[in-house]
Amino acid sequence: MHFPALLAAGGLIDQATFLSGVKGFLTLYYLSLALLNAVAAFLLWHHWHRPKAAVVWMVFSAVVLAGYFAPMAGSGDPGLTPRMPEAVVNFLNSWLSGQVGAIVYTVGSVVFFCTIFVARDYFVRPMVAWTCLNLALVAMGLSMVNQNFWHVVSKGDNIPIIGLMFLLGFFTWLATHRAVINDKRIAEGLPPLEKLDDEKVLVWPDLVYTELVCMLALTAFLIIWAILIQAPLEQPASPVKTPNPSKAPWYFLGLQEMLVYFDPWMAGVVAPSLIVVGLMAIPYLDFNKKGMGYYTINERKFAYLNFQFGFLVLWVTLIVMGTVLRGPNWNFFGPFEPWDAHKVEALKNVDLSEYFWIGLLNRGLPKAAPESTFLSYRFPVELAYILLREAPGFILMSIYLFVVPPALAIGTSLFRGMYLKMGFIRYMLLTNLLLMMAILPIKMALRWSFNLKYIIHIDEWFLNF
């Protein structure tokens, strides 16, 4: 079974047959990784004059990758092909499956983000970053021996997402590496690196020529891509047969994940509108004039943390979650777990009003009078009933949006300084935008931990939050 045909295979087959089909790809994968490390070793030796590091990576390239991983993977023998240890497979499947997996994945993403930020001086070192990249690529190769993992990552519309993950990691590292160097230079009283190379560059021919070369290279790459990998085309749409899971394009997977926790109107209209409005408001809210035209973190730490958290944790991780971990019926599956359409998790999602009136007070939800009663006053009576029923949610959200910002200004020096520099209106606008951004992980944690569906649930007005 050749590589393109195996990509289209949907079900599990005999392991020996599977390895026979992917052995050519795995061999090429490990040889490409070996060549990548050989080039790195040459650059370390010839250009950067680091002979010890060059020897280490050359040995890793020749002995580990080209000498062991490539030939063993090329054998197609289930007993010889390198694979992810079963202990690791079982551990990841058990901790990244179901509601527990959702919590572990989200909390782990936040912890990983915080760790990378706090220890950024260490992780931006080229050798540390290169080691992490090699570990990730080797782990990817070991994981692709598992058929369940293979069928997820080898889908035609998932391959670009896997590539984007590595590209995103590289460019995030590159920007952070530059920012760390600039922060050290500024602390020493030196200008940032961008000030050392501020020579004027003409649009023509410098920029246009470079863009033309990149366009030709990218066109050639896409042609080769289209030849080697089949387009992810499915059967014609039919009302009697729908895909399970039915997933949006990768750039909408974050919004599709948000639909689990919010009303479609809120997740599809209000939230994107707030994002656009928030981005438009930045020039009018930002009072820090430092960091213009050069990479820095220390001079814009608050802005850096918020943007990176919003983009990496609240957007990119949702895309990865929807691609790799969300399976049939939109259930959570471990990365090596088979996507069983019959897997059903019995969950009873409960609104905050039900928790308050039924759970806490042990009484039924407030009900409006029958339609025959007070007919001429129907709307005021129904409005009062709705406000009473959803009073816990309205009170909680009012505290969250209007009490928390002043409390932050009083209790923390950071927000107190922001309030003094920005004024009341700009400060309240900024903090409310930040709190609305934070409501997503809060709502996700409440759903997974307490099966909380909506904080405010008003189906009569299509207002569910």
Image: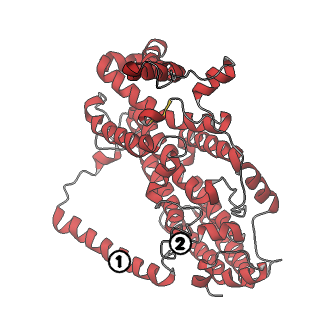
Q: Secondary structure at mark 1?
A: helix
The residue shown at (21%, 68%) is 208
Q: Residue furthest bottom?
A: 1
Q: Which residue is mark 1?
A: 219
Q: What type is the residue that disc 2 sits on?
A: Val
User: Quick check: 307 left or right of 58?
Assistant: left
User: Quick check: 363 left or right of 318?
Assistant: right
Q: Is residue 434 shown above or below 94?
A: above
The residue shown at (58%, 69%) is 37
Looking at the image, tell me whether mark 2 or mark 1 is earlier in sequence order: 2
Q: What type is the residue that disc 1 sits on?
A: Thr
- Point out residue 96 in the picture as x, y percentages from the top left corner: 70, 51
The residue shown at (53%, 69%) is 159
Image disc number at residue 39: 2
- Point out residue 178 in the picture as x, y percentages from the top left corner: 42, 48
Q: Is residue 108 in view from this perspective?
A: yes
- Point out residue 119 in the picture as x, y percentages from the top left corner: 57, 40
Q: Nearer the viewer, residue 231 or 328?
A: 328
Image disc number at residue 255: none
Q: Secondary structure at mark 2?
A: helix
Q: Nearer the viewer, residue 321 or 86?
A: 321
Indicate the quadrant where residue 297 lies: top left
Q: Nearer the viewer, residue 37 or 147?
A: 147
Q: Can you say which quadrant of the picture contains the N terminus?
A: bottom right
Pointer 2 local density, CA inside 10 Å: few below 14, some 14–19, many at least 20: some
User: Quick check: 457 left or right of 209?
Assistant: right
